[in-house]
Image (spheres, rainbow, N blue to C red):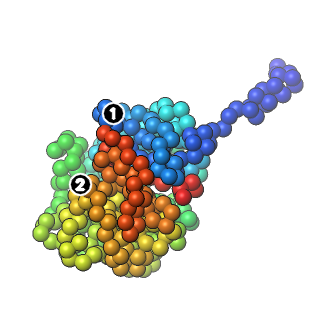
Amino acid sequence: MTSRRTFLKAALAATVVPRLSWADAGSPAYLGAAKDASGDYVLYGLDAQAQILFRAPLPARGHAAAAHPLKPEAVAFARRPGTFAVVVNCATGRITHRLDAPEGRHFMGHGLFVQNGDLLLTPENHYAEKRGILGIWDRRKNYARVGEVPTHGIGPHDVKQLSDGTLVVANGGIFTHPDIGEGRQKLNIDVMEPSLVYLSPDYALVEKHVLAPELHQNSIRHLSLAPDEQVAFAMQWEGDESETVPLLGLHRRGEAVVLAEADLGEQYAMKGYAGSVSHSGDGTEVAISSPRGGRIHRFDAGGNFLGAVVRGDVCGLAPMGDGYLGSDGFGALLAMKEDMRPLNAVPGLAWDNHLVALPELAA
């Protein structure tokens, strides 16, 4: 029988168990995956001035990460079509869990914590059935897989959540199979149907927006939310390389999609590829990056072109101040708006495609 003294002793011990927060990892403002000079793959934490706070080794090339809203924990996803993701304790740098996609599915490089971090959602290609799904993982059960729901499209790549719990999904429209062409061969280019989809908090379809038939090869890939919850999406053109098409879409629920593009010369310079998208820190504009074209394009909230910033192999974008934090494949981190200002450079480091902002900490 448990004595009163034993009970009180156990209760006291429970009250002093440390509850780690992002402060225990240095209060990072950003996360970014990279390959370092030794060839190792790493997840880095950056402060608000883009200085490195911590590094956590990854088992293979990373793409993007999902940051827990409260705990110093991030899920780093393998580059598409990866079948694994790892949970990193950012306070210790240790990998605590490994997530393996169920048979017949693969991850798409992105994920999202919902319900105060209790659940993790993972966009996945259900290649066995040629459809897109969101995998559901329960952090409270050591990241057990507890379900999946349809995204009402093929090739879901990115997912965000509005303040009312509504989910926004970018269905890229591209079907791939991990056993064909090293998993990256696009198998349905002629019949692609990219879409922007809204799901209710209980995963029911609310809205679905499909691009016009002449743009059916414009893959919707990455998402950004403005402070006022305008949705921006970046696209990658899989059609004729001689054509110039819009690479940025803007949307508000219940309204028509606005497609934005620069003047012809600048649009052509993007080479049909937008690698990342981000609203500025003050929410007044939005930018897309093209590592192939070596530039970022800036637009106002109405989709009017504001200008370009030229930088070789630039891709990662995140909100910073009234502008953006950018990263490139040469180890540089830059403050960007009308022009760019170097903040940090690590020789031999190659930043991967994305920077992930921790909204409550990013400045």
Could you tell me which residue is drawn at 82 percent across and 19 percent down?
1
Q: Quadrant of the C terminus?
A: bottom right
The x, y position of residue 168, in whole percent, is 43, 63
Nearer the observer, 243 or 349 = 349
Q: Is residue 358 above or below residue 139?
A: below
Q: Give the CA separation, mark 2 to mark 1.
A: 30 Å
Identify the secondary structure beneath mark 1: loop
Nearer the observer, 264 or 186 = 264
Q: Is residue 183 above or below residue 3?
A: below
Q: Dot 1, how many residues are within 10 Å of its Cα: few (below 14), some (14-19), or many (20+)? A: some
**Kind of residue indicated by mark 1:** Asp
Could you tell me which residue is drawn at 51 percent across and 41 percent down?
53
Which mark identifies residue 175? 2
The x, y position of residue 199, in whole percent, is 45, 64
Q: Dot 2, how many residues are within 10 Å of its Cα: few (below 14), some (14-19), or many (20+)? A: many
Q: Is residue 123 visible?
A: no
The x, y position of residue 292, in whole percent, is 22, 58
Circle 1 sits on which residue?
Answer: 40
Nearer the observer, 284 or 12 = 284
Nearest to the eye among marks 2 and 1: give it.
1
Identify the secondary structure beneath mark 2: loop
Q: Is residue 130 above or below residue 20?
A: below
Q: Earlier in the sequence, mark 2 or mark 1?
A: 1
Could you tell me which residue is drawn at 36 percent across and 70 percent down?
298
Q: Is residue 15 visible?
A: yes
Could you tell me which residue is drawn at 27 percent across and 48 percent down?
127
**Kind of residue indicated by mark 2:** Phe
The x, y position of residue 170, in whole percent, is 36, 62
